Image (cartoon, coloured by chain):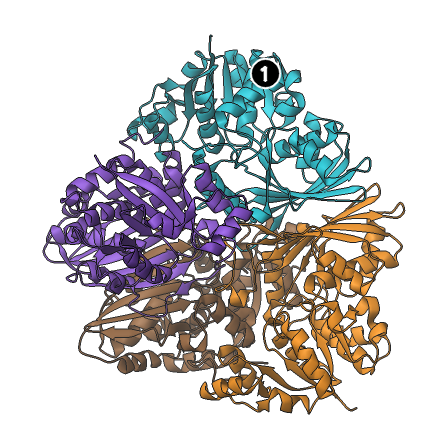
Chain colours: A orange, B cyan, C purple, D brown
Amino acid sequence: MKKIKIAVNGYGVIGKRVADAIMLQPDMELMGVSDIASDWRIRIANLKEIPVYAHGCEANDRMVEAGIDVAGTLDELLKQVDLVVDCAPRTFGAQNSEHYRRAGVKFIVQGGEKHVVTGHSFVAEANYESALGRDATRVVSCNTSSIVRTLTALKRAGLLKNARGTLLRRATDPWESHLDGIMNTLVPEKEIPSHQGPDAKCVDPELDVITTAVKVPETISHLHYWTVRINRPTSKEEVLNAFRTSTRISFIRYSDGLSANNAVKELMLDLGRPHGDMYEVAIWEDMLKVEGDELYYGCLVDNQAIVIPENVDAIRALMGVEPRAENSIKTTNKVLFIHPEFFLKPYLV
Amino acid sequence: MKKIKIAVNGYGVIGKRVADAIMLQPDMELMGVSDIASDWRIRIANLKEIPVYAHGCEANDRMVEAGIDVAGTLDELLKQVDLVVDCAPRTFGAQNSEHYRRAGVKFIVQGGEKHVVTGHSFVAEANYESALGRDATRVVSCNTSSIVRTLTALKRAGLLKNARGTLLRRATDPWESHLDGIMNTLVPEKEIPSHQGPDAKCVDPELDVITTAVKVPETISHLHYWTVRINRPTSKEEVLNAFRTSTRISFIRYSDGLSANNAVKELMLDLGRPHGDMYEVAIWEDMLKVEGDELYYGCLVDNQAIVIPENVDAIRALMGVEPRAENSIKTTNKVLFIHPEFFLKPYLV
Amino acid sequence: MKKIKIAVNGYGVIGKRVADAIMLQPDMELMGVSDIASDWRIRIANLKEIPVYAHGCEANDRMVEAGIDVAGTLDELLKQVDLVVDCAPRTFGAQNSEHYRRAGVKFIVQGGEKHVVTGHSFVAEANYESALGRDATRVVSCNTSSIVRTLTALKRAGLLKNARGTLLRRATDPWESHLDGIMNTLVPEKEIPSHQGPDAKCVDPELDVITTAVKVPETISHLHYWTVRINRPTSKEEVLNAFRTSTRISFIRYSDGLSANNAVKELMLDLGRPHGDMYEVAIWEDMLKVEGDELYYGCLVDNQAIVIPENVDAIRALMGVEPRAENSIKTTNKVLFIHPEFFLKPYLV
Amino acid sequence: MKKIKIAVNGYGVIGKRVADAIMLQPDMELMGVSDIASDWRIRIANLKEIPVYAHGCEANDRMVEAGIDVAGTLDELLKQVDLVVDCAPRTFGAQNSEHYRRAGVKFIVQGGEKHVVTGHSFVAEANYESALGRDATRVVSCNTSSIVRTLTALKRAGLLKNARGTLLRRATDPWESHLDGIMNTLVPEKEIPSHQGPDAKCVDPELDVITTAVKVPETISHLHYWTVRINRPTSKEEVLNAFRTSTRISFIRYSDGLSANNAVKELMLDLGRPHGDMYEVAIWEDMLKVEGDELYYGCLVDNQAIVIPENVDAIRALMGVEPRAENSIKTTNKVLFIHPEFFLKPYLV
């Protein structure tokens, strides 16, 4: 089988995980990563024997001076690939997209970019098919990905009327928490509704979802609280079953001692997952409650990990190598050890 | 005018503030405070020339040994007073209440106790009159006080159908954050609904309010996000006017740079308020939004301060010295410099 | 008595405190403050009825638009004063100094500027007299001020050979901890020795002091650990007496429950100090230990407050109105309620 | 080759890591782990197919009820093994030691126990040989292990006169940071010297080392600052070479972007290490400075990981299967991918 040849531009929090995930896929080949960093972060790519390309000549010079093994520039990398996954910092993806178009390669941008950059926003379980054969798509942000995953499951079961959520957002990522953090405070987003709710409509315009959002002083994961109005009388068990139709939603339980996001992170590390990543949306099963026409629940969203499988599926959709969402998701889940019950499957190496 | 003679049992976060507030009231006299501590915390009472009583003989011995000036024991203090405000740690108030009844003094317990301890739960703007002449009441918790204040204002304006809130609770108070904290994590309350919603019904059984709650790693104040369903078409201005009918709700504005709870705390300190206390519920005016039959807003609740004026009013209600809520609130607000517009009134000494 | 007419340029963490302190001095008159902010921070000056001047025309326009009551521009303010205390952010003081010189006013810059900006670095107890009548001086940083205060006391007692310190620096100030913090990490200063040690030599070239420094994720105060080599056999009591010769060093005690910097902050707030400020260096008396030719101790430095009395004294020194350090210090200490024993003096309003 | 049969009692932060490390050793066999937990933590052992034993009958009942697969009780486990590594919480190890003696198995306790519990304290590079064939030893704490490692290297090179250190201790471990933390504060240890310095003398009585210690609000790792007096004129390069004689000391560089402990943690995760563990003491190479007769440096100590290789070596020493420290260390280092240059060796799976 001919493998899809892929570049990753931007080897940061998302880029390095996408690169690792691509290397594990049976139908993909990572041709290289591109970045501007010349420190320990990119040195890791050398150590992993991933070809490193410089994003421009200045970056190339800095890398060479720092002793990084450089294979060439981004332009040279783009010539070798079918598709590039852009993982550059927010707003740079929009700039880069022109470059990718000129180079004639398909591309994926991340959720920090606007929908208009590609004209298509992607969540595998919601709209994989609509991305088939497109030139480009945008994998929506971690928050929006989890919103679409969970609400799509409820919608499919005919339960969803509307959803109102409060999103507690981790303030910064662990690797840069020495540079850019908040301390002993809470920072609400200025606007209500916050952008995550409307952004879900870029994937599914039928979703009626309003969110408020606030930065909280921790680095581990987002925590969402939801009040969902439902369409018809239902039971907790029916709701759980609706969520179970997604392979990327998992349940956690207070009764199992998993009572805070640090404990769930430790579980992921204990499971031997790379970086302690949790690709699944984790819903507290025993906290979830149905009352009258309302459903309440809380869930955790690992902002570093949740979009990784989405990027992998988006690659297959753009390349048109797999027409059915179900099949792509199955392949991706298998190699990333994603599944809905943390304690049933031996992830461990 | 004969002043109400009052004891404060428990000189901690709430007790020391209640004691200070009582000393400022024209119609009250603080006869003493009682505690078990024998360190810097109680030494402050000596410095302020508040008579210090020991909660029992062992405490008395420890205090004397530590060089605290002790005026006697709690029992001796109770003989001199009309009323005792219990500010002991959670659940001790229930134990103490038997003691107060036997001593024949009226008493107030705090929101950490159950409603049944006094059979009455108090928020001045909601049910002052129903406490007139009673032997005892319970000032509800900081979270519940703010819920009742704000929802009562909406209810009075005929706007409130129901309210769904997410409460971000400061994890511990600053003075004991070296002993009892959480770090780099979020700790949801196990149960949905959390207890704060139902507790509001102890004050006003008509309120339809559901809350979820989560501990967050900061010590400054709680932050609440609300989705309120309203009864009839309304406007943002009408909602603001409804809130303005409360003298203990204030507005803050993002456009004024007040974009996080640390900034609001600094404002309170700049205003010269003791301990930087904010007795008012602070609603972000420019974040508040009305959309269809829903109202969304966020507000800050200073958990150390918000119940202080409520305790003062509860004293007057129990003693029956002031039959009208409006008048007691006016007196309390005046001496504590409480008012709805932070920048219009010179608090500053 | 003719009062010294003073401007404060920069109404931030230090500027607002210096302004408040000047207003309390019997021999000084605050003519106004200047800033570029147009939000709640400067609104406070209006509320306190301090004349507000805009640092330039753009700032003036923004202030007017925001409804700030503006008295004029910095240039107009400078014409009215004998001296300006520059409290602008780091490095702006150097730029401003040219402006002050041209305006013909004496000036003080803060420790964020280099020594060369004024050619003189100031700590009241160490070198007040050398600043008499000068055109300008620099009040050294909070860390350096505390280093000079404590080591000067040991030097005067003939005890100091050399000092090696580790400085745990609060990462940011509370008012801006939503913008600029570190989270769940420790950030060492790149260079050993860190700059604070050498900087002490700008005040007293004889001091042999080396420091290492690290940012820690809290906002309350710095904590210093010292290993001091002493010149001759001594006792703990002799060391304590050496420190007691400074009126701006205080003792705190673990045995009194003051076991962490949050507890000491709460004490300052309980004492009714504005902003909970601690102008004194607080040394843990019962932690301090003498062993062989070495002395070990830990102390707290309130980075927002400690330089405030130093600025006040520096004003008197530059103006030459008080030839003796001792007298200026006495006046400053009296109005700011500074003294070496927190529990003996009633600060409380 | 007959493998050493080993039990691990206490499957927490240290226990689970020791268990994993034992499973990787060519000459050891993990017969089972024992614990009292019945939640997700012990469920991991089931998933890893490690036999789980209950520490007593009550624990057995709870485990069975929670659906844990239980192989028996600790007593039954002890009958099958040559040696037990006690990783129970502080002070429980002392209690358990009697039990182990009665069961006739050799045992290792951790640094939370006192030296007297076993009469021998262990650090592989310092005193492996003295533990050969003993019934029991104590692997000293993370802080003390790192102190002995680094100072032993300096001592061997004839450089060490004495060492004065300030230890910034992470306040709690990530997995329990929702239960037991400190917030926005610093908590000094009451006593100077803190216990870590003297404890190093349990391993090597010749070490002249004094430490002060303070808890800081982060969960990642300890950070030590050292001032070392040296015996003779030396150079930075000679000092670095002295450290290089230890295979468990590594260098990190600011110039490589590794400027805080969160960045170093990310590096460990990027390297694919289990839990992101760092077994080595990491010294900042470019921060280290020699000046006169003094050496200054800072280093990081991963408190969850650093004692793991020490426990492995201690097993071989007690069992007498490998008479030379060098050989045991080499084997341990190889399977745990421990080595002195993070960027030279491909750890990655």
Residue A205 in the image: state x and y as whole percent.
Answer: 83, 61
Could you say where residue C325 lies in the image, as x and y percent from the top left? 16, 45
Of all residues, the one furthest to the top in this rendering is B1
Residue corresponding to mark 1:
B317
Q: Amino acid at mark 1?
A: Ala
Quarter of the image where one finds residue A338: bottom right
In the image, residue B12 lies at what x, y percent?
A: 45, 32
Q: Residues within 10 Å of mark 1 (few under 14, many from 20)?
A: many
Marker count (numbered): 1
* The C terminus of chain A sits in image quarter: bottom right
Q: Is residue B277 above or below residue B314?
A: below
Left or right: residue B281 versus residue A131 is: left
Residue at 43% across / 44% down in the picture?
Answer: C71
- Location of residue A249 (image quadrant): bottom right
D231 left or right of B321 in image: left
Q: Where residue D280 appears, x then y in whole percent?
A: 42, 73
Viewer can see residue D59: yes
Residue D319 falls left or right of residue A262:
left
| Residue shown at the point (57%, 18%) measured from the top left | B328
- Please determine whether, in this image, residue B245 is positioned above or below residue A337: above
Pick whichever, D217 or B289, lies toward us. Answer: B289
Residue D21 appearing in the image: no
- Residue situated in front as seen by the camera: C182 or A284: C182
Task: Tell me which residue sits at (55%, 60%) in the image.
Answer: D11
